[in-house]
């Protein structure tokens, strides 16, 4: 909100991406008030625009899926490249020394307790990753995506988060590949339906990151079981250090802290256990969101906010009642062992 108005001082039109989170919407509102030219926001971060899909917060994937599928043929199309008539020449950045990244990070006041991730950022890196995924992993995606040991996911989430690659470009590459239909369908379900369910949730529910905006049935059942005895109770410091009694949970936390990412299946287990071993469900919610946003390269993102809330009942339904959880969906380490070689996963990260 300070830099963009200066860059747009002589602009005839300012075009930007729509932002779905409160902070993103606040930035755009502040910029629009400070520039003299018209401001247009486009949805380059979604395949199908959010308000085109629905005019309200959807209950679950099963309610938004048919609405998205009805529109896919209209929006899942290549965009024709347009040559820019006048190339943009930004201001000289003589004061920004890129030769010493550590010094720059210190100058920006970034939390130095979070280690640097090994991942390389940028559009070129995103496209290389997409090429490798389509060539070598996409065909097995339906079977391998839920196995944290198989490394069958695309790894593109951080690049989507930072706008370094378009979901439309990824979707077109996958849809046009020669991978089996079961694999492409499974991937597009995650990239479009599940991801845009998160965009929908944040757009229509400004309190997306607050415990008290969870579904009424989830709040009721968690409140009914808030006094249940917890077998273990950990502090935020213990969670952050990964020093619980559970090696599976500790390995997931170590993966996140050291790599800046966590496999989706383990992230669900990770969130469920924070709920099970915290003093209150409110404390658990705050802890999970704090850790996700602090350590994940794709933290502070609609997917992360809604992923945490899913562990507490968002976009889900009541299940069998049990202590602490009430009717919130339950997960345990035996389920991990049935799903994949959890010992290999633990040994990789601990």
Image (tube, rainbow, N blue to C red):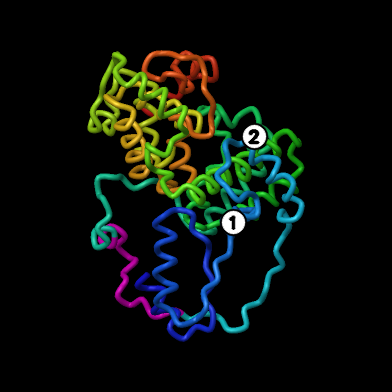
Residue 231, compared with residue 5, is above or below; it is above
Residue 31 seen anywhere in this rendered image of the structure: yes
**Furthest-bottom residue in this view:** 10
Can you give x and y, in whole percent of width and height, for residue 198 in the image? 53, 44
Along the line of sight, which residue is nearer the eye, 32 or 1? 32
Point out which mark residue 166 bears: 1
* Nearer-N-terminus badge (2/1): 2
Residue bearing mark 2: 62
For the point 44% across and 47% down, the residue is 298
Q: Which residues are magenta?
A: 90-104
Q: Within 10 Å of the Cα at label 1, are there few (<14), some (14-19), or many (20+) other Cα atoms?
A: some
- Looking at the image, residue 103 sits to the left or right of residue 139; the answer is left
Image quadrant of residue 194? top right
Point out which mark residue 192 bears: none
Along the line of sight, which residue is nearer the eye, 119 or 208? 208
> What main secondary structure does the magenta stretch of the protein show?
loop
- Looking at the image, residue 140 sits to the left or right of residue 231; the answer is right
Q: Is residue 296 magenta?
A: no
Along the line of sight, which residue is nearer the eye, 256 or 39? 39
Image quadrant of residue 34? bottom left
Spatial CA distance of label 2 from label 1 is 24 Å
Residue 263, compared with residue 197, is above or below; it is above
For the point 30% across and 45% down, the residue is 115
Can you give x and y, in whole percent of width and height, for residue 334 in the image? 47, 13
Residue 136 seen anywhere in this rendered image of the structure: no
């Amino acid at each position: 909100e300070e830099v963009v108005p200066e860059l747009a001082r002589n602009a005839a039109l300012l075009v930007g991406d729509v932002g779905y989170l409160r902070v993103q919407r606040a930035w755009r509102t502040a910029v629009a008030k400070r520039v003299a030219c018209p401001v247009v926001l486009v949805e380059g971060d979604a395949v199908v625009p959010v308000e085109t899909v629905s005019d309200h917060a959807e209950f679950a994937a099963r309610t938004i899926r048919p609405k998205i599928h009805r529109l896919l043929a209209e929006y899942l199309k290549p965009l024709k490249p347009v040559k820019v008539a006048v190339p943009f020449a930004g201001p000289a950045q003589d004061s920004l020394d890129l030769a010493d990244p550590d010094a720059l990070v210190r100058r920006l006041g970034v939390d130095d307790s979070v280690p640097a991730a090994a991942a390389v950022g940028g559009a070129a890196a995103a496209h290389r990753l997409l090429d490798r995924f389509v060539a070598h992993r996409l065909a097995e995606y339906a079977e391998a995506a839920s196995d944290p040991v198989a490394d069958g996911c695309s790894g593109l989430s951080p690049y989507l988060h930072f706008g370094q690659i378009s979901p439309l470009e990824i979707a077109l590459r996958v849809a046009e590949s020669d991978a089996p239909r079961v694999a492409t369908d499974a991937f597009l379900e995650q990239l479009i339906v599940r991801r845009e369910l998160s965009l929908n949730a944040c757009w229509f529910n400004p309190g997306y990151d607050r415990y008290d905006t969870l579904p009424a049935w989830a709040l009721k059942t968690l409140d009914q079981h808030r006094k249940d005895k917890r077998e273990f109770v950990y502090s935020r410091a213990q969670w952050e250090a990964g020093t619980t009694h559970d090696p599976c949970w500790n390995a997931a936390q170590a993966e996140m802290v050291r790599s800046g990412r966590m496999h989706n299946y383990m992230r669900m287990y990770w969130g469920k256990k924070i709920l099970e071993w915290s003093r209150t469900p409110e404390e658990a919610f705050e802890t999970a969101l704090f850790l996700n946003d602090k350590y994940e390269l794709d933290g502070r993102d609609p997917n992360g906010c809604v992923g945490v809330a899913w562990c507490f009942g968002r976009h889900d339904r009541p299940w069998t009642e049990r202590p602490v959880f009430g009717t919130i969906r339950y997960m345990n380490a035996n389920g991990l062992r049935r799903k994949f070689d959890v010992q290999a996963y633990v040994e990789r990260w601990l």
